[in-house]
Image (cartoon, helix red, strand yellow):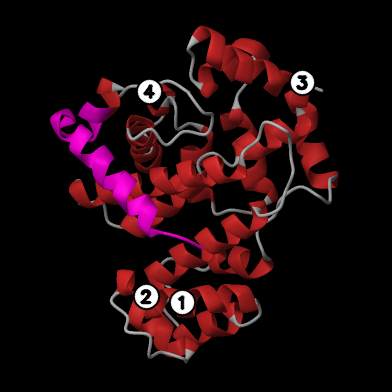
């Protein structure tokens, strides 16, 4: 099957992982939309999502003391931006939970890597004073959504990808391109369309390995995800066991005006942050 056929297959396959309708609707709300009642109305349609919001608001991680029982109070304590991040995180995790896409696809490793990149992007966004660190968190969380599609629709090729990663010491991205001449980036753009994700995330999903290759002005979220992904690799949190450290793209680091000397310490912080998060 060619990449050109994949969009049709994704749309016609009922078992392909999808975000809940509540999560999709929340992502579609404008960033400046702050109506707590509207968020509450949407979240209450998904009891599991509501439970995650309450649990987060009551957790020590978010400064809670276990006393909140009301969803609107929980939203008010967390703030709209954090609520959006939690909703997408929980819905994404739920979409993968229990799915057997391929014998070599490890949902837990994939999830841990996604979280690690999300946490990295949020930290990096704060370091460069980016206007919306929660937006960066979600971009990092969703950056690899093309990978499940590869495992589901190109199982034989993904067997070869795993073999190549191990035998030739390549990253998954490099092995995918070597074998198929396309990668999870292109697949990710198709999944982003299928999930009806806001267009602000599309470039970060579809071009995070080479964000400076675009003919247009570099996309800030794609730049952050590129470095965030490298940080996750440096922390040893990868999708494939034994996948090598991808290294840092020095041009991207320079574009963000970051100090590469801080990255080893940041990688350790990211590993600690990921260990704190559970859904």
Element assignment for label 2: loop
- Disc assigned to residue 55: 1
Q: Do callouts 2 and 3 mark residues in contact (Cβ within 8 Å)? A: no
137 or 175: nearer the viewer: 175
Residue 59: assigned label: 2
- Return the x and y of residue 151 as percentages of the image width and height: 70, 32
- Between discs 4 and 3, the one toward the N terminus: 3
Circle 4 sits on which residue? 245
Q: Are marks 1 and 4 in contact (CB under 8 Å)?
A: no
| Label located before the other in sequence (1 or 3) | 1
Which span of residues is magenta-colored? 253-279
List the residue tagged with mark 3. 156
On whether residue 234 falls in the magenta region, the answer is: no
Relative vertical location of residue 143 with respect to residue 275 in this rendering, above or below: above
Q: Position of residue 69 (x, y in %)?
A: 46, 91
Q: Is the residue 247 above or below the residue 217 in the image?
A: above
Q: Are marks 1 and 2 in contact (CB under 8 Å)?
A: yes
Q: Is residue 56 above or below residue 244?
A: below
Give the label on residue 101, or none: none
Quarter of the image that includes the N terminus: top right
Whether residue 171 appears in this view of the structure is yes
Q: Are marks 2 and 4 in contact (CB under 8 Å)?
A: no
Please tell me whether mark 2 or mark 3 is closer to you in this view: 2
């Amino acid at each position: 099957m060619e990449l050109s056929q994949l969009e049709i297959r994704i749309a016609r396959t009922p078992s392909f992982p999808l975000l809940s309708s509540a999560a999709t609707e929340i992502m579609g709300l404008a960033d400046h939309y702050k109506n707590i009642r509207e968020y509450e109305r949407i979240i209450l349609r998904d009891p599991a999502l509501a439970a995650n919001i309450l649990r987060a608001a009551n957790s020590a991680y978010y400064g809670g003391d276990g006393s909140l029982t009301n969803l609107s109070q929980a939203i008010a304590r967390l703030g709209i931006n954090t609520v959006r991040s939690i909703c997408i995180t929980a819905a994404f995790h739920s979409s993968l939970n229990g799915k057997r896409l391929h014998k070599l696809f490890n949902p837990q490793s994939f999830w841990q890597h996604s979280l690690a990149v999300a946490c990295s992007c949020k930290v990096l966004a704060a370091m460069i004073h980016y206007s919306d660190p929660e937006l960066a968190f979600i971009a990092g969380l969703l950056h690899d959504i093309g990978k499940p599609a590869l495992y589901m629709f190109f199982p034989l090729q993904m067997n070869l990808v795993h073999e190549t990663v191990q035998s030739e010491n390549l990253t998954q991205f490099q092995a995918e391109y070597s074998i198929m001449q396309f990668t999870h980036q292109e697949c990710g753009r198709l999944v982003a369309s299928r999930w009806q994700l806001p267009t602000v995330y599309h470039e970060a999903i579809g071009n995070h390995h080479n964000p400076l290759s675009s003919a247009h002005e570099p996309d800030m979220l794609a730049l952050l995800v590129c470095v965030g992904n490298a940080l996750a690799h440096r922390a040893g949190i990868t999708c494939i066991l034994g996948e090598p450290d991808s290294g840092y793209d020095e041009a991207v680091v320079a574009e963000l005006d970051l100090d590469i000397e801080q990255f080893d310490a940041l990688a350790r912080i990211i590993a600690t942050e990921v260990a704190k998060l559970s859904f």
